[in-house]
Amino acid sequence: MAKVVVALGGNAILSKDASAKAQMKAVKETAKELVNFIKNGDQLIITHGNGPQVGNLLLQQIASDSNENPAMPLDTCGAMTQGSIGYWFQNAMKEELLDSGINKDVISIVTQTIVDENDPAFQNPSKPIGPFYKADEVAELKAQHPDWEIVEDAGRGYRRVVASPKPLEINEYHAIKQVVDAGIIPIVSGGGGIPVVRKGNRLVGTEAVIDKDFSASKIAQLVDADKLIILTSVGGVFYNYGKPNQQELKEVGVDEVQAHIDADEFAKGSMMPKVKAAVDFVRNTGNPAVIGALEDVQNIIKGTEGTTIVKQRVNV
Ligand SMILES: Nc1ncnc2c1ncn2[C@@H]1O[C@H](COP(=O)(O)OP(=O)(O)O)[C@@H](O)[C@H]1O
Ligand SMILES: NC(=O)OP(=O)(O)O
């Protein structure tokens, strides 16, 4: 039995339609794929992004902000998305498991992730959240929201970016480990976890969105996972992505990927955190990490799809 941490992108939950109904439908499709890990005999730990959802929630907060009904801060919005997305997954996974004749419990755990208040990321926002905007909408958005940073997101449009400090510790990991050992499927560290700073015995929420790929790597190391699988909207990692000479990677050693990270060849805010998180997991555990598409889960399990990053390639 392999212990597998699966990280899902916020974009895998929300495509164009941001209604709860459409997101629940997408989560249900995702759950159908995830149940394949259980059928394969794996122990599953699920984590997910929240970039689109937390950005949309912030917009709702701004739209209804008043003395009587004040806007919630970003850390609280992160917690709210852990609750809503966790509910969707908990609900959909249980139904899919029962439909497959498997009686297993699924539970989402509100997770706090400890960050360093002096992390330079607080001065350099990089995490895209919320909807995509067109180039000609940016000037008006900046006039409406002078405190917003807006950047181009991997050729897909423009998005607001917020601070994204690195996860140092997952506060609830002892409890998460016990849940996994009890044979329960946990949904953890949603949206990278709620960013908190340690002040003695207190954990104080801070306004940021942690990259779920980095926190997934941390969780995977803390629970001694055999594999980290990052599922997204693309079949694997490409060199020269989007160019005529793009090349999809099948199996690749950490040192080779590191050289491409050092040369800044992957898109910031999309593929770069995934490859960095995967390399961190492989280096610290010696176990493989896979980056691939959600719809390819069955073949990822067989090892025929996705990009697998390994400590050292056997046949080079
Ligand atoms: N080198 C690359 N190889 C593959 N995909 C890439 C690369 N560079 C950028 N991308 C883009 O990254 C996207 C995945 O990142 P993102 O949308 O942030 O993931 P998620 O929300 O699923 O975590 C892909 O859909 C693809 O458009
Ligand atoms: N928090 C986070 O990494 O979200 P996305 O995966 O949606 O970007």
Image (cartoon, grey):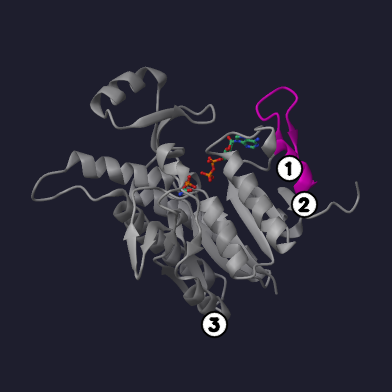
Decide which of 54, 126 is in the foreground and name it: 126
Q: Residue furthest bottom?
A: 182
* Few, some or many residues within 10 Å of mark 2 (<14, 14–19, 20+): few
Q: Disc 3 or 1, which lies upstream in sequence?
A: 3
CA gap between label 2 and label 3 equals 31 Å
Q: From this viewpoint, which residue is outermost toward the left?
A: 68
State the residue position of label 1: 257
Residue 86, quarter of the rendered image: bottom left
Please state the extent of the stretch shown in magenta in the rendering: 238-260
Q: Is residue 141 above or below residue 86?
A: above
Residue 153 to residue 38: above or below = above
Are the residues tagged 2 and 1 within 8 Å (C-beta)?
no
Tag 3 residue: 182
Residue at numbered disc 2: 304
Q: Is residue 78 above or below residue 120?
A: below
Proximity of marks 3 and 1: CB atoms separated by less than 8 Å: no
Instruction: Give x and y (percent) for residue 163.
Output: 41, 42
Return the disc, 2 or 3, that comes first in the chain's sequence. 3
Farthest residue to the right: give it. Answer: 315
Under circle 3, the secondary element is loop
